[in-house]
Image: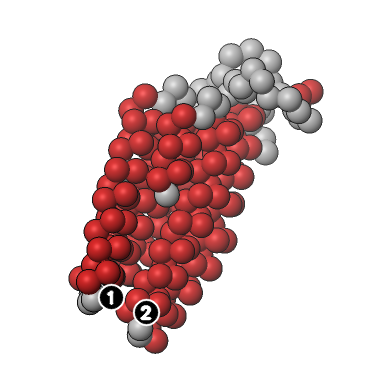
Amino acid sequence: MLLAGVGICRMPDLFLRLQTTAKASTLGVGLLLGAAAVALEDVSVTARALLGIAFIFAITPVATQLIARAAFRAGIPLWEHTGQNDLEEQRPRGAPREPHLGQRETD
Amino acid sequence: MSGWQELVCHGVLGTLGVSLLLPLYRLVRGPSLTDRVVALDLLALQVAGLIIVYSVYTGHSVLLDVALTLAIISSLGTIVIARYLFSGPGGQP
């Protein structure tokens, strides 16, 4: 978890920040829940910890993937040393655009 | 609770408290909206971890429910904000 904090502070780019925080925080919360299940020694606590581990391992990568796709579509600038960019031709030109509420425009 | 277990709990609580400051820095300074969303998600997960360690420290297993709910709600909130970010002009996924 401390490594995730250092990563979100030091990484030069949104996408690198995403990948360093998602994995570290998922593993951190999972291991802490496992430690709580071992330390408290109760059946209900163990069941809750297993349920929590399953939920977190299921939901956090989905949220990270959605955020990364939304950021890429919105045209957030990449780090200048990023080597491979397979989706370059689908990337919108120009400055990052702002999201807006309400009905989607059909263009 | 034995002595070394209490010592480990103190150490982990201190480490998590220090690591709470780093996403807070990114939350204040973040150059774009998505940076702030990611920082908020990480902050909520770290608070959930802090609550888990505190529940082990005090022996109150009820606090685990609080931590679980916080983690799940924060991840769902991140998904909802990602849907909102898709909603710009030409933002079909």
Subunit ID for the residue under disc 2: A
Determine crowd level at label 1: few under 14, some 14-19, many 20+ residues with C-alpha closer than 10 A.
many
Task: Determine which residue is flagged by label 1.
Answer: B61
- Compared with A2, A59 (above or below) is below
Q: Which of the 4 image quadrants contains residue B60?
A: bottom left
Quadrant of the rendering where the C terminus of chain B is positioned: top right
**Which residue in the protein does label 2 denote?**
A45
How far across and down, in percent of the image, does residue A59 sit? 54, 57
Q: Say if residue B37 shows up in the picture.
A: no
CB contact under 8 Å: marks 1 and 2: yes
Q: Secondary structure at mark 1?
A: loop
Residue type highlighted by circle 1 = Ser
State the residue at coordinates (33%, 69%). B65
Q: Amino acid at mark 2?
A: Val
B10 lies above or below A2: below
Point 26% across, 50% down: residue? B14
